[in-house]
Image (spheres, rainbow, N blue to C red):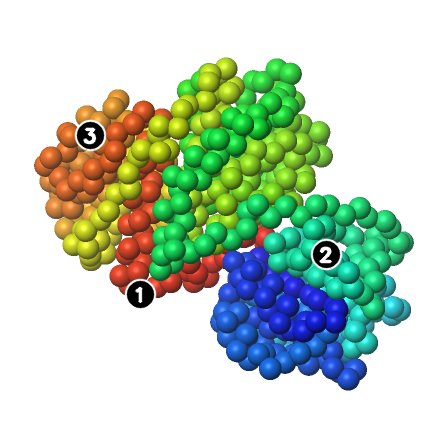
């Protein structure tokens, strides 16, 4: 999940790389660093923490050949020793790496490689340094010995850069005599870029780019247009997360307008005989997929959502009459990408539902359904989740040959404002549960994920009908239960469940548009069609997590141990 940047040119490369790392900070902010060549010697500056720390350390530094990295720790703790870039034992090479080298311990022992850090990356670097030949040959030959995933950028003391990739993204652009390298197209400059495919490599020296295949043979690559419609949105509030939640209405409206004006659904190729839909995703996108599966079933199409990390290794029977939808905000999620490649190998119908135009998932899938949520910076997905749910709902209408809705809903639903007393009350409980039935259970799952990922509260969601099958044993005066109820058919059943909780001393807070819960504390929602309510009800859950996070003094945009784009398994 780490971010990689590189620069060769006549400008201040240190400044350019630090600029790029700031854009890539969503990929990790445990530590960061730069390496550059000066007088035939490689210098390295790195630090623990955010890119702003690195910016201060390098403000008076300048170089024309620079590589940089912002880290999300996989191997080795968060400290300066494990931060990238790493310097080879010989001192002639420096490297930044994104990915996981699964056999690094075996390689270290087999080739008697030294390492000062606890990382797999440094082992890979010293393996490269042990190889014979030119730098491009060293990198290609070493890559054949490693097992796992990588995007690497290697800097030689003579100023040459070599990059290569296997299942982790890496891109280049050239603007006149300047070359930019990054893990995300958004960190590049210029109007066009080159994307490395798996097991492709490139050498950049004297501002000239040469591409190679895995056999070391020179290849020709075509550039692609950089689309930056999803660039960073302005922050109008204290945090990006708050700004992004409050953008939800606008981006839902934008998505609806785009679908109507550009006839995007007409470009989607469906199986000749559509029998079912499989949705594959991770985390928040998986919850959106669960919701999408319910939408498809309501219009008569059999559907099921799968965790990508399980789908890859499961025993699902893949067939040509199923549409496989891969849902990812970034379009770079490692397990989702691997699942998509597995389906693509069988030449089956595929659709990518993503928020980023220039992403790997879009390149893999035959069809693309964009969500138009705009750039989402906070790690905890909010507006992008709502757009995923909204897009899947709209797609279900198309499959049922129904018209898309008018803009009334996205223009008129109101955000819920919590009073500080309620927020402090929820935060004071030792145990927090989210409950619901049907679509509300899926919302409860997403609400629980939001609270735990930014407030670090050990909470979980449960289908309310399952309370009596074990979880009721945990309910006492130390427990608060947040119940979501937006579906008419389950209202009376849920109310009975809540009475059981109340009888055992648990605090109950109901989130609903109905007036049937006057015996409990309530968060009142605007009332719309029930299929719109999962979007209406999730927003106060996002705000609740945000406010509790801020009450505890945490940064909701950069929760500990997490990163925005999960590019490693």
Residue that badge 3 annotates:
514
Residue at mark 3 to residue at mark 2: CA–CA distance = 54 Å
Left of 182 or right of it: where is 373?
A: left
> Which one is in front in this view, the residue at disc 1 or the one at disc 2?
2
Q: Quadrant of residue 8?
A: bottom right
Inter-mark Cα distance, 1 to 3: 34 Å
Q: Residue at x 17, y 43 (%)?
A: 508
The location of residue 10, given as percent across then percent down, is 74, 71
Is residue 394 visible in the rendered structure shown here?
Answer: yes
Q: Quadrant of residue 107?
A: bottom right
State which quarter of the image contains the N terminus: bottom right
Viewer-nearest residue: 148 or 69: 69
Q: Secondary structure at mark 3?
A: loop
The residue at 50%/15% (across/down) is 401
Q: Which residue is mark 2?
A: 172
Graded by Cα atoms within 10 Å as few (under 14), some (14 to 19) or many (20 or more), the crowding at tag 1 reads few
State how many labels appear. 3
Checking the image for residue 561, the label placed there is: none
Residue beneath label 1, please? 553
Residue found at x 64% / y 68% = 16
Residue under the image location 28 percent in, 55 percent down:
547
Q: Position of residue 349 (x, y in %)?
A: 64, 27
Residue at mark 1 to residue at mark 2: CA–CA distance: 39 Å
Comparing 280 with 103, the one in front is: 280
Tell me the SS state at disc 1. loop
The first of marks 3 and 2 along the sequence is 2
Dot 2 falls on a residue whose secondary structure is strand
Tags 3 and 2 in contact by the CB under 8 Å rule?
no
Mark 1 vs mark 2: which is more N-terminal? 2
Name the image quarter holding residue 487: top left
Q: Is residue 433 left or right of residue 521?
A: right
Give above or below for 87 relative to 196.
below
């Amino acid at each position: 999940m780490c971010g990689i940047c590189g620069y060769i040119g006549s400008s201040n490369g240190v400044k350019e790389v630090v600029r790029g790392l700031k854009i890539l900070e969503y990929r990790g902010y445990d530590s960061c660093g730069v390496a550059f060549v000066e007088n035939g010697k490689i210098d390295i500056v790195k630090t623990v923490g955010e890119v702003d720390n690195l910016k201060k350390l390098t403000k008076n530094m300048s170089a024309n050949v620079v590589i940089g990295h912002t880290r999300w720790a996989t191997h080795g703790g968060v400290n300066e020793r494990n931060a990238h870039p790493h310097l080879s034992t010989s001192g002639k090479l420096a490297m930044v790496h994104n990915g996981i080298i699964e056999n690094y311990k075996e390689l270290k022992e087999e080739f008697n490689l030294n390492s000062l850090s606890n990382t797999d990356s440094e082992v890979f670097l010293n393996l490269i340094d042990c190889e014979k030949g030119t730098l491009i040959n060293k990198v290609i030959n070493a890559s054949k010995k490693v097992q796992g995933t990588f995007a690497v950028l290697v800097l030689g003391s003579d100023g040459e850069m070599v990059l290569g990739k296997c299942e982790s993204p890496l891109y280049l652009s050239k603007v006149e005599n300047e070359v930019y390298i990054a893990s995300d197209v958004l960190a590049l400059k210029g109007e066009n870029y080159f994307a490395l495919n798996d097991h492709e490599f490139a050498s950049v020296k004297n501002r000239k780019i040469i591409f190679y295949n895995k056999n070391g043979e020179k290849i020709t690559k075509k550039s692609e247009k950089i689309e930056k419609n999803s660039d960073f949105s302005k922050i109008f509030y204290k945090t990006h997360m708050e700004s992004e939640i409050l953008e939800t209405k606008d981006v839902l409206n934008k998505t609806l307008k785009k679908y109507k004006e550009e006839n995007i659904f007409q470009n989607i190729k469906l199986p000749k005989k559509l029998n079912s839909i499989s949705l594959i995703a991770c985390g928040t996108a998986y919850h959106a997929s669960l919701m999408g599966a319910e939408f498809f079933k309501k219009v008569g199409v059999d559907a099921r959502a799968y965790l990508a990390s399980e789908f890859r290794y499961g025993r699902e029977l893949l067939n040509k009459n199923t549409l496989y939808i891969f849902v990812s905000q970034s379009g770079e999620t490692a397990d989702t990408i691997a699942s998509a490649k597995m389906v693509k190998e069988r030449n089956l119908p595929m659709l990518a539902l993503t928020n980023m135009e220039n992403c790997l998932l879009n390149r893999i899938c035959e069809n693309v359904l964009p969500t138009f949520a705009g750039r989402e910076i906070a790690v905890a997905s909010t507006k992008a989740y709502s757009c995923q749910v909204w897009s899947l709902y709209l797609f279900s209408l198309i499959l049922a040959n129904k018209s898309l809705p008018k803009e009334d809903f996205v223009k008129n639903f109101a955000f819920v404002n919590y009073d500080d007393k309620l927020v402090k009350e929820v935060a004071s409980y030792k145990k927090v549960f989210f409950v619901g039935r049907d679509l509300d259970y899926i919302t409860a799952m997403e609400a629980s994920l939001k609270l735990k990922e930014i407030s670090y509260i050990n909470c979980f969601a449960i289908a309310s009908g399952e309370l009596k099958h074990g979880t009721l044993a945990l309910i006492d005066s130390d427990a608060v239960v947040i119940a979501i109820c937006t579906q008419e058919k389950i209202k009376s059943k849920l109310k009975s469940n809540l009475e059981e909780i109340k009888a055992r001393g648990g605090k109950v807070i109901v989130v609903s548009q109905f007036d049937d819960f006057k015996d409990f504390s309530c968060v009142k929602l605007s009332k719309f069609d029930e299929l719109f309510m999962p979007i209406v009800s999730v927003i106060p859950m996002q705000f609740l997590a945000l406010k509790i996070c801020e009450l505890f003094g945490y940064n909701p945009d950069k929760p500990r141990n997490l990163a925005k784009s999960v590019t490693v398994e």
